[in-house]
Amino acid sequence: MLRNYLSIYDAAAVHMEITYASPSFSDLLSAPPSSMPSSARPVRIIPLLHPTGTTSPADVGFWRWTAKVRRMTWFDWVELFLPCLRWIRIYKWREYLEVDLMAGITVGVMLVPQSMSYAKLAGLQPIYGLYSGFVPLFVYAIFGSSRQLAVGPVALVSLLVSNVLSSIADSSTQLYTELAILLSLMVGIMECIMGLLRLGWLIRFISHSVISGFTTASAIVIGLSQAKYFLGYDIDRSSKIIPVVKSIIAGSDKFSWPPFVMGSITLTILLVMKHLGKTRKHLRFLRAAGPLTAVVLGTTFAKAFHPSAISLVGDIPQGLPKFSVPKAFQYAQSLIPTALLITGVAILESVGIAKALAAKNGYELDSNQELFGLGVSNVLGSFFSAYPTTGSFSRSAVNHESGAKSGVSGIVSGIIMTCALLFLTPIFEYIPQCTLAAIVISAVIGLVDYDEAIFLWRVDKKDFLLWTITSTTTLFLGIEIGVLVGVGVSLAFVIHESANPHIAVLGRLPGTTVYRNVKQYPEAYTYNGIVIVRVDAPIYFANTSYIKDRLRDYEVDVDSSKSRGPEVERIYFVILEMAPVTYIDSSAVQALKDLYQEYKLRDIQIAISNPSPEVLLTLSRSGLVELIGKEWYFVRVHDAVQVCLQHVQSLKAGSNVSQAPLSSSEDKPSFFARLSKERGERLSITDLETGNSRPPLPKDRDSKLEPLLSKEH
């Protein structure tokens, strides 16, 4: 009969199943034929494949990466550093050229007045805004990987430049301009380094709530900083709201009506055109034409009536910027924090927009390569008098809505800027300052994201708290402190969630072999003497203590009202479902060893279910697999429950298993042999599964029992 059973085992193994009964399969084989039940039906367990190699997942990843590098051709390497080749070789000239020309002209017309406005926001002369919208556009079209992103000066970066440089030099001095250009070089170098080292993933630690709160507060500060052009008198330059408001109130006796009226009318026109462009598809062009319309109307009014109370932009140099090396390197160390902050804003604003646009247009985008392209455009732009630039949300949206298909649209926008520098600067000197201020305010109004705050309050109070903290600290303590506080609180939330992971007690859904959280599925039931626990996070040094404490709690606090199976007084088995555990470190391994020893003293056995290959390899290297025993590692929770339930049945039947270790030994009789001897009767596995070997129970209790595996299986 033993030979027949071995043949059954071999056949089952071919079908990726093995038979599993008592403490070990060897016990079952070593049992004398007389002790085998005549109607035994072995429990079928899917075998777990234990690791046999010594190669770590990191080594596998490294060799996979090196193999990929070896497969790259010379064209792949050229394409890696010149992403423009990707769209050039698939460019459909007849189909794409017309829409790219229209999109480029639309964005270029929008960029010219915006670049001058943002330069004023940065504390620079308007010409440097035009310079910043010249060389970076051509460079990004070559090195950038996004086909719809529109780069150039943006409001938030301009505010950051003004905030840091105003504390070092006066905005009217040449040093101020040199520092702004040097900042562009430093930002570009940092972006290139981060792109080459593939560090773009660092920005993932900044949550969307922090970004929304930061941009909302920054938009309010930007809007208030432009109030001086509306009110007709100077106000203090600051990134904090209180000094700006105090300055506005203190100088109220100098208020002038003409710039306020003209600025308000211009702002109204811009907002109406933007609204119509967003809500009416056939009027979409109005959104892009708004800034140009404001400039034309303001310039025409100023040149016709020459109002003395309205300040004008003044003389703007004509011609293209000349090549020059950035200066004032002695101030580089003091600019490093701001350069890092601007780099972070570039990743948040530009890379996020670029990835969203790439998804909408059906192509993939590498965020690290995108960061490298932005860095090169800033580095080369600094040699042509540009201050830090990045991708613009509003202009990129217009570029996408206009149907841009490739970097050709960016080149066309650059040509528009070139024509403006060569031929239109004499006209720009008549642009009213309040008109440029109205353009800035209309652009940043959309950044005040109060809808996001309402959404967060309704969905997640914790994220709403994070949004509130970030926006409040940015408003009252400054941009740098606001960002640091927001990121710090965000990381604190991440650490707290990681150190206190979600842990669930699992129960079996009636009529299935599926095990789910008993709190989520009240109909799920557990088995007496067995607790099934799922850890929904990686296990590492920060959360091992929490996990151990929760396991001790589950061992004591057992809801017996939903338990089935043989009635025992305490827990004998703890099954750890490790499917969600993607990583386990050495501290966690040591904690599991300590837990195993602690359980062993209390005669409790640990079983591991469905560990990932990486986790299983770590456990194997640490000796934990041998310590617990390979027979206690399972593919499914259901397999572990079947084995554990048989042991619990033997305990209930009065066996001596509870007085001896659960691990197997060759000199002990098998589980079924001991059980048959003590009960004085032959028991089938089906009887054990259904609980028929137990003493008779009341009829109302019998109806609640359900076999682990039905006879049809």
Image (spheres, rainbow, N blue to C red):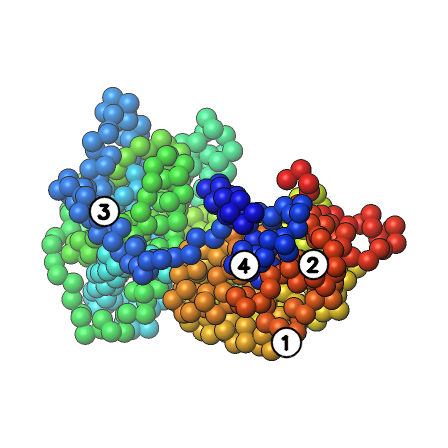
Query: Residue 68: which numbered mark, if any?
Result: 3
Tag 2's secondary structure?
helix
Q: Which of marks 4 and 1 is nearer the N terminus?
A: 4
Q: Can residue 37 be seen in this view?
A: yes
Q: Which residue is drawn at 16% across and 63% down?
A: 326
Q: Earlier in the sequence, mark 3 or mark 4?
A: 4
Judged left or right of residue 16, residue 551 is: right
Expressed as whole percent of the image width and height from the top left, the position of residue 570 reads 72, 69
Tag 3's secondary structure?
helix
Q: Earlier in the sequence, mark 3 or mark 1?
A: 3
Pointers 4 and 2 in contact (CB under 8 A)?
Answer: no
Q: Which amino acid type corresponds to the residue marked 3 in the rendered image?
A: Lys
Distance between the Cα atoms at labels 3 and 4? 52 Å
Q: Earlier in the sequence, mark 2 or mark 3?
A: 3
Q: Which residue is drawn at 67% across and 45% down?
A: 39
Q: How packed is label 2: few (under 14 Cα within 10 Å), some, or many (20 or more)?
A: some
Q: Which residue is drawn at 45% across and 55% down?
A: 612
Q: Mark 4 points at which residue?
A: 30
Pointers 3 and 4 in contact (CB under 8 A)?
Answer: no
Residue depth check, mark 4 versus mark 1: number of the one nearer the observer: 4
Q: Mark 1 points at which residue?
A: 602
Foreground residue, 698 or 658? 658
Q: Name the residue under label 2.
A: 676
Q: Earlier in the sequence, mark 1 or mark 2?
A: 1
